[in-house]
Image (cartoon, grey):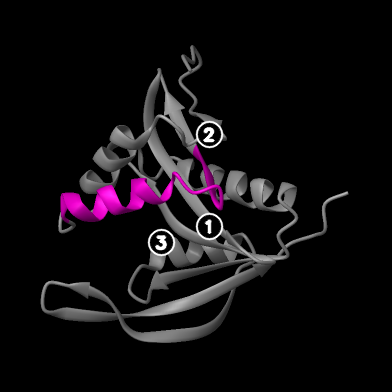
Amino acid sequence: MANKSGTAQIVPHLTEQASAIEDIYLAAYPQKMATEAKILTRLMKSKAVYGAVACLDAQIIGFIILLSSGESADILEICVAPTAQNKGIGKRLLSAGIELSIAREQEKIILEVAEDNDVAQQLYRNADFKEIGRRERYYQRGIDQIDALVMEKHLPIAH
């Protein structure tokens, strides 16, 4: 996974990466508990779960985790280490997730994003995700409850 150019590599494998994924998740979301990170990585053992990691100098700096359910995929989490944010890693991980979903012959990808997360919403809109609904009080942040926007992207059929 070493990379001499200083550009992150996107690797379409999640296996054996649980510890690093948990560390990045907890660094990006300091309000989360370790048990939440463990639940996320336990899901990765399912054959219906797939995704990719971003590596820089043999160190994982981000990941995307998706769940295949019927003809659609759900983005369970996309996360970039705080020290690697705002460098296009999230965009590259999202692109990898889309490509993996197309290869799995998924028809669409669905996700939820906090209504106050403008950066993530812009990332998804730039990738042609469209808002299709809202889930009231979906995210809990301390005593605050934040609505989630539900977004989807239809995928081309793989040949």
Q: Is residue 82 visible?
A: no
Crowd class of label 3 (few under 14; some 14 to 19; many from 20; radius 10 Å): few
Q: Is residue 94 magenta?
A: no
Disc 1 residue type (three-letter): Leu
Q: Is residue 10 above or below residue 93?
A: above
Mark 1 lies on a secondary structure that is: strand
Within the image, what quadrant is residue 115 found in? Answer: bottom left
How many angstroms separate mark 3 from mark 2 (CA)? 26 Å
Identify the residue position indicated by label 1 in the image: 67
Neighbour tally class for label 2: few under 14, some 14-19, many 20 plus, Cα within 10 Å: some
Within the image, what quadrant is residue 69 found in? bottom right
> What residue is pinned by disc 3?
119
Residue 156 sits in which quadrant?
A: bottom right
Residue at (44, 27) in percent of width and height:
55
The x, y position of residue 61, in whole percent, is 37, 34
| Helix, strand or loop for disc 2 | loop
Identify which amino acid the numbered label 2 is placed on. Answer: His
**Residue 82: percent from left, percent from top:** 28, 43
Check the image and report above or below for 142 versus 87.
Answer: below
Sequence order check, earlier mark of 3 and 1: 1
Q: Position of residue 79 (x, y in %)?
A: 38, 49
In the image, which residues are magenta? Answer: 33-52
Where does label 2 land, which residue? 13
Between the residue at mark 3 and the residue at mark 1, the CA separation in whole angstroms equals 23 Å
Q: Is residue 136 above or below residue 143?
A: below
Residue 44 is inside the magenta segment? yes
What residue is at 59 percent from the left and 49 percent from the top? Answer: 97
